[in-house]
Image (tube, helix red, strand yellow):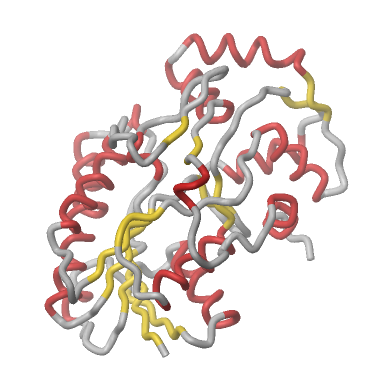
């Protein structure tokens, strides 16, 4: 039995993994530690095989962030992660798993362009959120040793029942709009069930290194919206007649242009980067959308 301490109470990913492990993985037991405030520093990490660090701040509105907001991102996403890992190492934990993000490679390419991340792609965070993750990774690398394995996960957009971020916006649009742009793009995505399976393999196999989990399929935004609508028994018209206004907004730049590029731009991991010796992509695209939308 592997004992895992999830650091970050109330986290979507941490909560999802704890529930998944209890239901699906008898070889892993989990406990959760609240990282808010300073009381966590008094917790005893001895006896745990792995720390799964999910505490962090995401979904930054870069344009509205104050200087204090930016400093908070570095305190939480960078400093807290390194301090937690240092404590884990000092108290004999053998593995530390850190949730980074595809955002360390920058934003997606704009409409009509394709961005493929390969093993040779350098880190190029476009904002303080991505930079805070990249700096945490750098600090954690310095802690790695033969007796202290560090796993860095750089997932793309994660979605699933109750997820936050961009998916709920797409879900709302799919349930209300009669029509949606039919724009060709490609995005790597990761269903939370596939992520939980992957994390369990990292723990059970005592892994070390940087990993790039994603679903087996790339996804078009338009196809995802159509699948969400279908999960609710709706039909939504995908039409190229709406493409020109979206492309025009994208060219305008600013907040509106950034939102359009985020929705219809492309960013994918080269698929070979995400291969693992054991299968973790248990849920296909259509099934994952149905489960996310509450279907059986």
Q: Quadrant of residue 52?
A: bottom left
For the point 17% across and 81% down, the residue is: 42
Q: Is residue 230 above or below residue 281?
A: above
**How many numbered marks have been drawn onto this rendered protein structure?**
0
For the point 74% across and 51% down, the residue is: 286
Where residue 15 appears, as percent x and y from the top left, is 48, 70
Q: Is residue 64 left or right of residue 137?
A: right
In front: 201, or 287?
201
In front: 2, or 16?
2
In front: 27, or 278?
278
For the point 65% across and 11% down, the residue is: 245
Q: Is residue 234 above or below residue 76?
A: above
Q: Is residue 238 left or right of residue 82?
A: right
Q: Is residue 150 above or below residue 136?
A: below
Where residue 97 appears, as percent x and y from the top left, is 32, 65
The quadrant in which the N terminus is found is bottom left
The quadrant in which the C terminus is found is bottom right
Q: Is residue 90 left or right of residue 291?
A: left
In front: 65, or 196?
196
Q: Is residue 208 left or right of residue 243?
A: left
Where residue 131 appears, as percent x and y from the top left, is 25, 39
């Amino acid at each position: 039995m592997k004992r895992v301490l999830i650091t970050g109470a109330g986290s979507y990913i941490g909560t999802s993994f704890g529930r998944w492990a209890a239901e699906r993985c008898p070889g892993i037991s989990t406990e959760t530690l609240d990282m808010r405030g300073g009381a966590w520093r008094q917790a005893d990490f001895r006896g745990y095989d792995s720390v799964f660090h999910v505490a962090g701040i995401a979904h930054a509105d870069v344009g509205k962030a104050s200087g204090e907001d930016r400093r908070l991102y570095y305190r939480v996403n960078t400093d807290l992660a390194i301090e937690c890992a240092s404590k884990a190492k000092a108290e004999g934990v053998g593995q530390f798993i850190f949730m980074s993000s595809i955002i360390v490679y920058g934003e997606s390419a704009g409409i009509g362009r394709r961005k493929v991340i390969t093993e040779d792609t350098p880190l190029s965070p476009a904002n303080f959120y991505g930079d805070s993750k990249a700096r945490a990774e750098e600090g954690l690398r310095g802690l790695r040793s033969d007796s202290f394995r560090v796993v860095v996960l750089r997932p793309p957009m994660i979605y699933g029942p109750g997820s936050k971020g961009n998916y709920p916006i797409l879900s709302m649009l799919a349930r209300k709009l009669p029509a949606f742009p039919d724009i060709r793009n490609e995005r790597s995505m990761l269903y939370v069930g596939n992520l939980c399976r992957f994390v369990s393999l990292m723990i059970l196999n005592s892994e070390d290194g940087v990993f790039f989990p994603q679903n087996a399929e790339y996804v078009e935004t338009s196809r995802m919206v159509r699948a969400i609508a279908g999960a609710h028994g709706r039909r939504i018209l995908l039409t190229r007649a709406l493409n020109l206004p979206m492309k025009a907004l994208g060219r305008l730049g600013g907040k509106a242009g950034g939102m359009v590029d985020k929705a219809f731009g492309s960013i994918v991991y080269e698929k070979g980067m995400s291969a693992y010796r054991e299968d973790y992509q248990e849920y296909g695209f259509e099934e994952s959308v149905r489960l996310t939308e509450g279907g059986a």
